[in-house]
Image: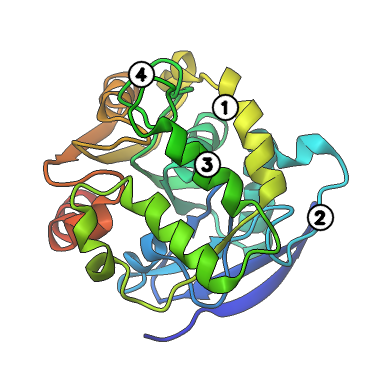
């Protein structure tokens, strides 16, 4: 598997570390608190055969500029940063694809900058705060795995963890969000490693408590594709169904044998559905 090419992109809003791979139409991918590197990202790899993917480290992630003010870690600032990257690269428009919190950023991006997006792809995501309003969510205190997930998230924020210990904790955390946790090694077999930006995660933990853009979804004027696993415990399927009803030009597909990672849990089906919906 070829590595991603690292670029430092200078914009009016600062320097951004971006990893690029593939050929074709440009696709922008990011996540609220992931730190990407040359090894790439499992979700982003889904697109590299047919598109030129720009995998963006937001502020306080990787070698991208540090935030000087707290608000620079917000989702609103994230979409303003992405817009400047698009303009700097000279694209009149591009596709945005977001998984999980990346999809939440994508929703906001499309509400405010629909004309900049050729298409919007939302995978296992939501347009509003999902933890307190659904006991199906693993971040809800009534979910049976809530306590362990919270413990794992706190442990993974520690900067001095040994590599093997971090890998073990990360595996357990991910297995809690798989329909067939015993298939973890099969799904995550590539040499892809990424870290968590603790400052971004801490900011998101507060910001998501008041996040709700459902009343603005009608403002999205770009073609939107929504994909989700039937058994998703992070962003339960109900939130994808809700978005599909409120966004004007949308397609919805639910993967019946998937939890939070349908692009890995049903990889062939995911690619087939994606190709059909994107064509």
Dot 3: what SS?
Answer: helix
- Earlier along the polypeptide chain: callout 4 or callout 2? 2
Query: First in sequence: mark 4 or mark 3?
Result: 4
Quarter of image, res 251: top left
Q: Secondary structure at mark 2?
A: loop
Q: Reading the chain from its start, which is encountered first: label 2 or label 3? A: 2
Nearer the observer: mark 4 or 1; the answer is: 4
How dense is the environment of label 1, judged by Cα within 10 Å: few (below 14), some, or many (20 and up)? some
Q: Which residue is mark 2?
A: 66
In the image shown, does 219 or 92 lie closer to the viewer? 219
Instruction: Please name the residue that numbered disc 1 is placed on.
Output: 208
Secondary structure of the residue carrying tag 1 is: helix
Mark 4 vs mark 3, CA separation in Å: 20 Å
Query: In percent of the image, x 32 and y 52: which residue is there?
Result: 175
Mark 3 vs mark 1: in front: 3
Disc 4: which residue: 134
Residue drawn where x is 20% and y is 62% of the image: 183
Residue 27 in view in this figure: no
């Amino acid at each position: 598997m070829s590595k991603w090419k690292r670029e430092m992109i200078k914009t009016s809003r600062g320097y951004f570390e971006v990893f690029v791979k593939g050929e074709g139409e440009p696709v922008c991918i990011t996540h609220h608190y992931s730190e990407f590197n040359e090894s790439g990202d499992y979700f982003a790899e889904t697109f590299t055969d047919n598109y030129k993917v720009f995998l963006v480290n937001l502020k306080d992630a990787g070698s991208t500029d540090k935030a000087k003010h707290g608000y620079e870690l917000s989702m609103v600032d994230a979409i303003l940063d992405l817009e400047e990257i698009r303009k700097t690269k000279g694209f009149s428009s591009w596709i945005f694809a977001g998984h999980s919190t990346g999809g939440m950023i994508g929703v906001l991006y499309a509400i405010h900058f629909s004309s900049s997006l050729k298409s919007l792809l939302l995978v296992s995501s939501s347009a509003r705060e999902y933890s307190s309003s659904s006991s199906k969510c693993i971040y809800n205190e009534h979910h049976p795995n809530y306590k362990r997930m919270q413990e794992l998230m706190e442990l993974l924020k520690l900067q001095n963890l040994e590599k093997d210990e971090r890998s073990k904790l990360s595996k357990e955390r991910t297995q809690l969000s798989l329909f067939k946790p015993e298939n973890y090694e099969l799904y995550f077999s590539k040499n892809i490693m990424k870290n968590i930006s603790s400052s971004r995660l801490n900011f998101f933990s507060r910001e998501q408590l008041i996040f709700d853009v459902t009343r603005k979804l009608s403002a999205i004027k770009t073609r939107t594709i929504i994909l989700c696993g039937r058994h998703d415990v992070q962003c339960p399927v109900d939130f994808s169904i809700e978005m599909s009803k409120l966004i004007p030009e949308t397609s919805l597909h639910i993967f019946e044998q998937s939890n939070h990672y349908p692009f890995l849990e049903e990889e062939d089906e995911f690619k087939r559905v994606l190709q059909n919906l994107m064509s």
